[in-house]
Image (cartoon, rainbow, N blue to C red):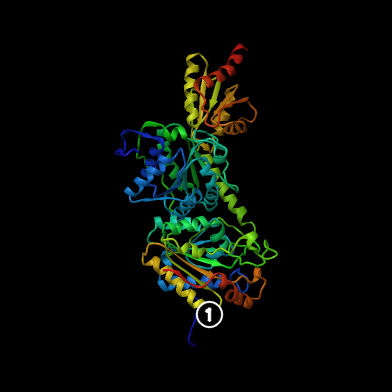
Amino acid sequence: MTQQRITVDERILMCGNEALAEAAIIAGCDAYFGYPITPQNEITAYMSRRMPEEGRVFVQSESELAAINMVFGASATGKRTMTSSSSPGISLMQEGISYLAGAELPAVIVNVMRGGPGLGNIAPSQGDYFQATRGGGHGDYRTIVLGPSTVQELVDCMPLAFDLADQYQIPVVVLADGILGQMMEPIVFNKKPRRSLPPKDWALTGAKDREQNIVRSLWLPEGSLEKHNYKLQAKYEQVQKNEVICEQYQIDDAEIVVIAYGVAARIVRSAVNQARKEGIKAGLIRPITLWPFPTEQIVKAADELSIFLVVEMSMGQMVEDVKLAVAGKVPVVFYGRAGGGVPTVDQVMERIKQLTIPVKKQ
Amino acid sequence: MKTIFERTPTLKDCPTHYCPGCGHGIAHRLIAETIDELGIHDRTIGIAPVGCAVLEYNYIDVDMVEVAHGRAPAVATGMKRTNPDKIIFSYQGDGDLAAIGTGEIIHAAHRGEQITVIFINNAVFGMTGGQMAPTTVLGQVTATTQKGREAANEGYPLQVSELLALLPGAIYVERCALSSPAQIRKAKKAVKHAFELQLNGVQGLSLVELLSSCPTYWRMTPVKAMEWIENEMTKVFPLGRLKG
């Protein structure tokens, strides 16, 4: 276990799981609740040591169901709080995430994805994209989903996740995977200025000199739940309008653009560089917010292009959002591997060549 | 005219949605009186369950949260650990605490969470229409045991308080009944003691089980329901202090 001295604004080497945990502490996380599951156990172990050192709360829960409800409790009192897990554990948390969304409580949930379905395996995967970006639990709701690609970006995602959660009173999912969680990379913890955030006047802090506060997701009188759903929808529209983050790499003159996120996008970036060396004008669009999805950027690119290739570590999930965005304007081709399979640069290159050589012949 | 009894301020002045003869109203009053007598209105946070008491926040005038079925002890854990100066109580029925939330209550007690749990046992699922609860007694007719509960098929009534009393983290466990003025006075003492333990910073979980009437799904008059608590329920769920 890493016990290195944590310094701000200085380059240090850390694995993704521990780095994101420290980044959460720097971001002011008051309480962490979690249950062990591979490949994210370094987060729980790190938090068990560091949170008490900072005078903050760490509880190892009896299940993921309990962990997310502990998060619910701490959040309802206005605290910054998080949990982390991996795919099967995140499935168990869906009940609580739906309640958080319904009750408009902020929370940060880290999913270090592994292979599925079922118990699957402990190898990296991007198989939970649907679950994360469609809400995941019951009811009409969304969570903000961040899909970092490097350990540094994972570190930078944490304060952003807490700020977005507080600003919009919404659960925020940080969607990493087994590679990102386990790999060590040099990182810098930056103390960036916080967003200006609304006061948590809704929090349960004891009804002193004010009316009772109630945190709930039940709306029984006729029409009241529909009204609540419209309120949530208006908030989601604000998120879609204001919070899309997306990297565009070498797309200006590209004849083929590959769309990928997370660790898959790192492989694609290498393939794009390789393609450019071989004279193929390839580019990369990398959604960093998976919800809100960078639909506009993709639509814009579609106007200039003849084809998209989507690469994922799944059997094809984000590709549906790309297809929805381009609405049939250009062909969208998919390449993916699943169950712990990770695409290689050569495999991606092969697809790029297959798709561009016939175009060149014309 | 001298006032000899009045509504305690933390109990809101409004009609409840409970059926005639239901025990929830009595239990709410005991909690509200305790909060006022201990002077903890400004620092108490309550947790409403899924079940008939889901709208408890409409009747008890403190900060309250409504949570998923059975998860109150986990929510309470998150609240108390981050707010040790606040008084946290959960209010849970037998479906909530003894069926779907068995894991959460056992582990909250096991960790010795400094929270107060008011456990309403009326031997039946009320809100969903009178189905069998883990605490339904043998022979009791419910929507899902239409010939009466049989041990061979549905198992025996679950005595959760006895189970919890075994755990070192549970510091106080008592079972009372809301069946007569005398029993209600005993219940009040128990509820108050459970809150006092938390207020005094005694580490561990305190729980009061209240045997409570459900005339609607027992298909009895309110008076008969009170008699059934005393004559039948207490045979399976004996009254008294189990721990502490």
**Viewer-closest of A176 and A320:** A176
Secondary element at image label 1: helix
Q: Is residue B54 above or below residue A352?
A: below
Q: Position of residue A87 (x, y in %)?
A: 52, 40
Chain for mark 1? B
Question: Pointer 1: residues within 10 angstroms few (<14), some, or many (20+)?
Answer: few
Quarter of the image for residue B151 reads: bottom right
Instruction: Look at label 1 and name its amino acid.
Output: Pro
Query: Residue A203 is drawn in which quadrant?
Result: bottom left
Residue under numbered circle 1: B181
Q: Is residue A117 left or right of residue A164?
A: right
Can you name the residue that lies furthest to the front here? B152
Decide: is B165 above or below A273: below
Q: Position of residue B64 (x, y in %)?
A: 49, 61
Q: Residue at x 59, y 62 (%)?
A: B134
Q: x, y percentage for residue A211?
A: 47, 64
